[in-house]
Image: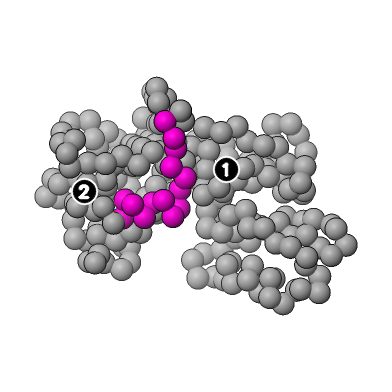
Amino acid sequence: YSKRNKRDGVFPEMKTNPIEDKKFDSDSWFCYPAKVGDLLCFIYFNVKFMAQGVTLCNLFDLADESEYRNRKPDLIYVYGYEDGKDNQAFYQDETNDMIVALLSANDDFDYFGYMKKMVLTLHNVQKINHRELPIHGAMVKMTLHNGETKNIVVMGDSGAGKSESLEAFRNLSEQYVKDMKVIFDDMGTLLLNPKGGAPLGVGTEIGAFVRLDDLDTGYAYKEI
């Protein structure tokens, strides 16, 4: 039913907290506590945008109570605030090490891309703040018929052929590849390994760190 089928414009940073003076009717809002990679994001959405809010479960794991109770979120995103404007911006709260963002209720924003992409933008900014490298790409673990395993990262713009390349590996390389496991296929992060050795990779939609040289000896990541 959504009124748009693409996303336009930019998601700028502002110097003041966009939700500091806002009022919310609890009967009109839901909160989806999402695990975006290893970050906790409280995504508040207006009931008028229920379809976009529920669809989040296809992208981000829902944190359970033990993972969000009495814990400060890393990110807060308010989607569909009825202020009669077309506000879309985020604020970096350095004091609390948190990023806060707001998007107005507007027909121009009535598209799931304004839910997904904004959350990923907040994730990426926070990762950069913590000296980690977010990437738009895909990562896959390949197991060859001789038992050797390799992890491959493919990066590129939207439409460049990242997912298609992975599918081509699957379809055209059966004589070489025994098994493939996708680690992430849209947004991920590369970071230095605190224990040394190969860097680690983590996706925004899964809950495991992996070493880039050998997934099977990767380090388990601590759940939120």
SS class of the residue under badge 2? helix
Q: Which quarter of the figure has residue 210?
A: top right
Residue type at tag 1:
Gly
Q: Which mark is residue 215?
A: none
The image position of residue 52, as x and y in percent, is 31, 55
The image position of residue 131, as x and y in percent, is 57, 36
User: Is disc 1 surrounded by few (<14), some (14 to 19) or many (20+) residues within 10 Å?
Assistant: many
The image position of residue 166, as x and y in percent, is 64, 67
Along the viewing direction, whichever of 53 and 111 lies nearer the viewer: 53
4, above or below 126, in the image = below
Residue that mark 1 sits on: 207
Q: Is residue 63 magenta?
A: yes
Q: Which mark is residue 47?
A: 2
Along the viewing direction, whichever of 61 and 95 lies nearer the viewer: 61
Q: Is residue 211 left or right of residue 2?
A: right
Q: Which quarter of the figure has residue 15?
A: top left
Segment tinted magenta in the rendering: 52-65
Name, please, the residue furthest toward the right. 146
Name, please, the residue furthest toward the bottom. 172
Q: Which quarter of the figure has residue 117?
A: bottom left
Residue type at tag 2:
Val
181, above or below 89, in the image = below
Residue occupying the point 59% across, 72% down: 164
SS class of the residue under badge 1? loop
Query: Taking the image as drawn, is residue 194 in sight?
Result: yes
Residue occupying the point 18% across, 56% down: 106
Q: Is residue 93 left or right of residue 138?
A: left
